[in-house]
Image (cartoon, helix red, strand yellow):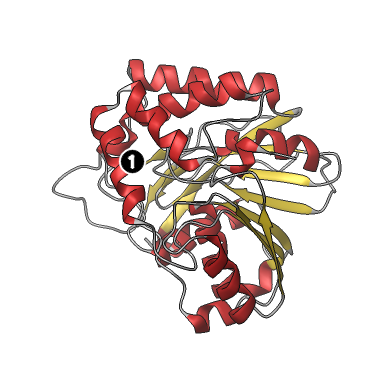
Amino acid sequence: VPLRHLNVVHAPPLNSKNSSPCRAEIMGQSPSKEPAQAQSHEGVAWSELFAAYDNILARHWPTFSSTTVPTSFGCTHVNLAGPLEGPLVLLIHGSGASSVQWASLSKALSTKYRVIAPDLIAEVGRSVLSNVKRTPASDEEIIEWMHEVINGLGLQGKLINIVGFSYGSWVAAKLASRSPEIVKKLVLISPAGTFYPLSAWFFLKVLPAVIFKSEARILAVLQYMTKDGSLDPLMHADILRFFVASFRSPHFDHKPLPPPAPLPDDSLRCITARTLLLVGEFERVNTYGPAKALARARRYLPHCETKLVTGVGHMMTDEKPT
């Protein structure tokens, strides 16, 4: 739905501690034969997920505030931290995760930067779809949603440092390619499907965990996505609790976000911001492994620094957050 058809209640300013409930009203459209069904966060599985979510915020996130931003897809929950006038850094988390994934990094960044960490719509955070049958169905719609969040926070015309992890790196790269004028610097951590397709082995590992939701199958995914299943010792138990709860949550019951597809060469050339690409030594999520991804980035990104991070796999923000 184009923004001109939305009568929205704007998010509070970034210095607000907490927002009032979010609402967005679609204007100027004929009533649908089938009323929209908003996403529900009721039930035991969601309760367990949000208990794990709130536990990480309470134990590991820096002093923070939160707000909600109305968009044409639903209400986006955003966690905030750091000085109000600090340089802006937007953190975009991965699939099957939420903004609490950034707890360790936010603690470091918030000493200097104004940290903005939204929960991706249609994922396992506190953002709520206004219609479970309408999730962003393409990369264009994801970028539309991202712009609505940025504009709803009052950040139009401001340069933003953008950091993405996994699926969030794909979203960040798409945003930087299509809207290079808003990106000051770009950091891509363990990008999923951004330079080369996702590995078939990745789907073979993840699908049984999604279907059967047993702890053994979920932990097998963790083993595959890390060097050896080891996580940051300070957060191991809390990350594990959220990881298991995310697979058991009902968020897989609605239409998922579109899978990441490698950016064409010309799209990569459009990313003009200074870029840092970090890929783990034991990265297994993408086809061909880390060396080819780093090489393609160096070839097509105009201002890119690449680094192979030793001793970690795909989940490097949870394995070695420093």
Residue 309 visible to an observer of this rendering? yes
- Counting from the top left corner in percent of width and height, residue 16 is at 71, 35
Q: Secondary structure at mark 1?
A: helix
The residue that disc 1 covers is: 206
Residue 263, compared with residue 253, is above or below; it is below
User: On the rendered image, what quadrant is the C terminus found in?
Assistant: top right
Residue 195, compared with residue 96, is above or below; it is below
Label 1 CA crowd tier, 10 Å (few <14, some 14–19, many 20+): some
Q: Nearer the viewer, residue 59 or 265?
A: 265
The structure residue drawn at horizontal position 42% and vertical position 25%, both measured from the top left corner, is 244
Q: Is residue 59 left or right of residue 179?
A: right
Quadrant of residue 131 within the rendered picture = top left
The three-letter code of the residue at mark 1 reads Val
- Counting from the top left corner in percent of width and height, residue 68 is at 56, 38
User: On the rendered image, what quadrant is the N terminus found in?
Assistant: bottom left
Residue 256 visible to an observer of this rendering? no
Q: Is residue 104 left or right of residue 8?
A: right
- Counting from the top left corner in percent of width and height, residue 313 is at 56, 45
Residue 4, compared with residue 246, is above or below; it is below
Q: Is residue 121 left or right of residue 165?
A: left
The structure residue drawn at horizontal position 57% and vertical position 19%, both measured from the top left corner, is 237
The structure residue drawn at horizontal position 49% and vertical position 68%, both measured from the top left corner, is 195
